[in-house]
Amino acid sequence: LSERLGGVFERLSRQGALNEADVITALREVRVALLEADVSLAVTRDFIKAVQKKATGQAVTKSVTPGQQVIKIVHDELVAMLQGEGPAERLKIDNPPAPILMVGLQGSGKTTTSGKLARRLKEREGKKVLLASLDTQRPAAMEQLAILATQIGVDSLPIVAGESAVQIAKRAKQQATLGGYDVYILDTAGRLQIDVALMEEVAQVSQIAQPRETLLVVDGLTGQVAVEVAQEFDAKVGITGVVLTRMDGDGRGGAALSMRAVTGKPIRFVGLGEKSEALEVFDAERVAGRILGMGDIVALVEKARETFEAEQAERMAKRFAKGLFNLNDMKMQLEQMMKMGGMQGVMGMLPGMGKMAKAAEGAGFDDTMLKRQIALINSMTKKERANPDLLQAGRKKRIAAGAGLDVAELNRLLKMHRQMADVMKKMGKGGMMKQAIKMMM
Ligand code: GDP
Ligand code: MG
């Protein structure tokens, strides 16, 4: 979107005022972007209509260009729609033991999310949590939850062979009451698609458990299907909220907007990985940025503006826009990262770098490593920094020794540099960085 919008906004920025034709032109591109992000057709149509009405009615503020004005309206409207009445309200889990019912298709992430949620409630709110698997369908599903529970350090309902989902739900309630639990989470079985038997079972369980919260777990990568699933589950069991999983992947999260618009139910959490801590409260701003296809460049540039010297930022922006990225740039970035919350924080904000950040994490990358890498770059000559191709064996030895580190570490740094330079090159080509930075500065 940023590429396509780039041209439109450039045109808009050359004109003095925002007229209806401008708005329509810009929104045509927004429409395509939404559909590409898997927002459903009907929702896209409504959204565009709402924005158009707002945008054409508005006078152009003096201090911004018409292009900035349109993107702000689009962005704000997206956030408003995603957010609903307010920030994702807290789960209703007073009156212990409070049942939480997890529903959704098979493989959407119900079991994983049950574990994540249990961990969150335990660690952040000090709740005593019981996990219960009602999945009588998939072999080993119950063991999967029991293992998760052990890892997290919460209790799980003992497994009794041959029970039905409804019987397990009853036993969970009993155990939760007797055991003095604050919350019990019922992890149900899914099917590959909506079917009558599944709905019937979930409805029965819901009837018995009378859950305080029924959370629909949806794979954030599924797009359109998610809307049908949400409608179906909401009609049959009445969901109170949605959890979007796999938002660590490449999906644009358009499903979030569609589900929000169609069901009116809040998106409570997003899943950002397989580990039990990878669950975050839904952040409408972030997802809006993602749907618009700009990653969190907006946030990155804003944050950078706070900490960067303006001049330095400008210089770097220009180099990035050209796809240039040498070891001097990398050093500046590494130093900047230290200020901006470390490696994970920054990489996570750049489109396409989420995976790299993960790989880095896997390789034991942390902030002490940032310091070592800066030391390695400091140990290089000016020429070497500007032209990493110079770094053959002899020089490498000298540099590593100078930093008091070994060559293997230097090689890792150089490999990472190459990867980053590649990404920069790609982004530079697309003109994405340039547009984003121009718009913000
Ligand atoms: P269920 O069938 O709905 O219970 O789904 P599971 O919880 O068993 O999850 C299916 C697969 O998706 C597992 O391999 C999980 O590790 C994975 N998974 C779940 N949530 C996430 C997430 O937020 N991100 C990623 N990357 N994987 C996830
Ligand atoms: Mg499961």
Image: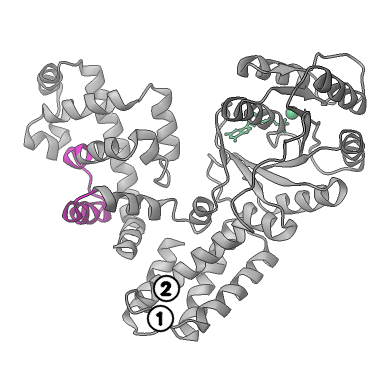
Please state which of residues 426 and 155 is positioned toward the viewer in this rendering.
Answer: 155
Q: Is residue 316 magenta?
A: yes
Please name the residue that numbered disc 2 is placed on.
Answer: 69
Q: Is 131 drawn above or below residue 102 in the view shown?
A: above
Q: Residues within 10 Å of mark 1 (few under 14, many from 20)?
A: some
Q: Position of residue 317 (x, y in %)?
A: 24, 54
At label 2, which amino acid type do we have?
Gln
Residue shown at 72% from the left, 40% from the top: 92
Q: Position of residue 413 (x, y in %)?
A: 26, 28
In this image, 165 relative to 24: left or right?
Answer: right
> Which residue is at the far front?
95
Ligand 1 within 8 A of label 2's CB? no
From which residue to which does the magenta span run? 308-331
Q: Position of residue 106 (x, y in %)?
A: 75, 35
Residue shown at 42% from the left, 73% from the top: 69
Please state which of residues 396 and 245 is positioned toward the viewer in this rendering.
Answer: 245
Look at the numbered disc 2 and give the secondary structure of its residue.
helix
Residue shown at 39% from the left, 52% from the top: 299
At label 1, which amino acid type do we have?
Val
Q: Residues within 10 Å of mark 2 (few under 14, many from 20)?
A: many
Please state which of residues 35 and 101 is positioned toward the viewer in this rendering.
Answer: 101
Task: Work out whether mark 1 precedes mark 2 in sequence or the reverse, and give the earlier one.
Answer: 1
Image quarter for ligand 2 equals top right
Please name the residue that numbered disc 1 is placed on.
Answer: 60
> What is the magenta segment's predominant secondary structure?
helix
- Residue 431, quarter of the rendered image: bottom left
The answer for how far apart the CA atoms under marks 1 and 2 are is 7 Å
